[in-house]
């Protein structure tokens, strides 16, 4: 087994192992995975991902494909404001405009 990469935290390592297993690559983890002290930051959280030497090229390709997917993923579109919020905002704006213009119109007309 040779080191493919290292990640921080057992969750990230398990996600990567699942991705590799889905491609038929037998991978293992080494590091603080199932111990009583599960660190998630710093060097103590480092987990190495190991693969068989004859599958290292395929595993590196899976890592590259994963990076490309992450880099080209489109952000989630912003949720649209419900129509009733827009209507309430328009009515409020109209009320403010009328309240500001009415005294001026009364003064000029009167």
Image (cartoon, rainbow, N blue to C red):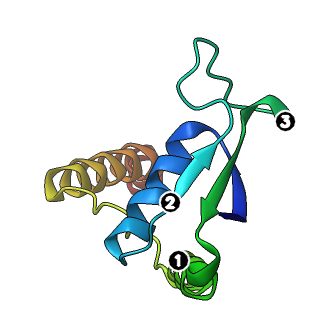
Q: Is residue 71 visible?
A: no
Judged from the image, the secondary structure of the residue bearing numbered disc 1 is: helix
Marked residue nearer the N-terminal end (3 or 2): 2
The answer to whether the residues at label 3 and label 2 have Cβ atoms under 8 Å apart is no
| Dot 2 or dot 1, earlier in sequence | 2
Kindly identify which residue carries mark 2.
Answer: 16
Q: Real-space Cα distance between discs 2 and 1?
A: 9 Å
Residue carrying label 3: 43
Of the two numbered discs 3 and 1 on the same chain, state the one appearing first in sequence. 3
Q: Quadrant of the N terminus?
A: bottom right
Q: Nearer the viewer, residue 34 or 52?
A: 52
Q: Which residue is denoted by mark 1 in the rendering?
A: 66
Asked if residue 20 lies left or right of residue 6, the reply is left
38 above or below 36? below
Residue at image location 30% in from the left, 45% down from the top: 92
**Point 47% across, 72% down: residue:** 75
Q: Nearer the viewer, residue 8 or 101?
A: 8
**Where residue 34 sits: x, y (%)?**
52, 25
Q: CA distance from mark 3 to mark 2?
A: 19 Å
Above or below, 77 against 105 in this view is below
3 and 1 marks in contact (CB < 8 Å): no
> Camera-side residue: 72 or 62?
62
Please tell me which residue is depicted at 80% across the width and 29% down the height of the picture.
44
Q: Position of residue 79 (x, y in %)?
A: 31, 60
Assign a secondary structure to mark 3: helix
Residues under numbered marks 2 and 1 in contact, where contact means CB atoms less than 8 Å apart: yes
State left or right for residue 103 relative to residue 55: left
**Which of these two is toward me, 30 or 16?**
30
- As measured in the structure, the alpha-carbon distance from the residue carrying label 3 to the one carrying label 1 is 23 Å
How many numbered circles does the render carry? 3
């Amino acid at each position: 087994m040779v080191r493919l990469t290292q990640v921080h935290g057992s969750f990230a390592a398990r996600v990567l192992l699942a991705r590799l297993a889905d491609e038929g690559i037998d991978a293992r983890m080494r590091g603080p995975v199932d111990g009583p002290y599960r660190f998630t930051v710093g060097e103590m959280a480092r987990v190495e991902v190991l693969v068989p030497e004859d599958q290292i090229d395929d595993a590196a390709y899976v890592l590259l494909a994963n990076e490309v997917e992450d880099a080209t993923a489109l952000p989630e579109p912003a949720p649209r404001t419900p129509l009733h919020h827009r209507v309430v905002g328009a009515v409020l704006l109209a009320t403010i405009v009328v309240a500001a213009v009415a005294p001026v119109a009364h003064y000029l007309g009167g």
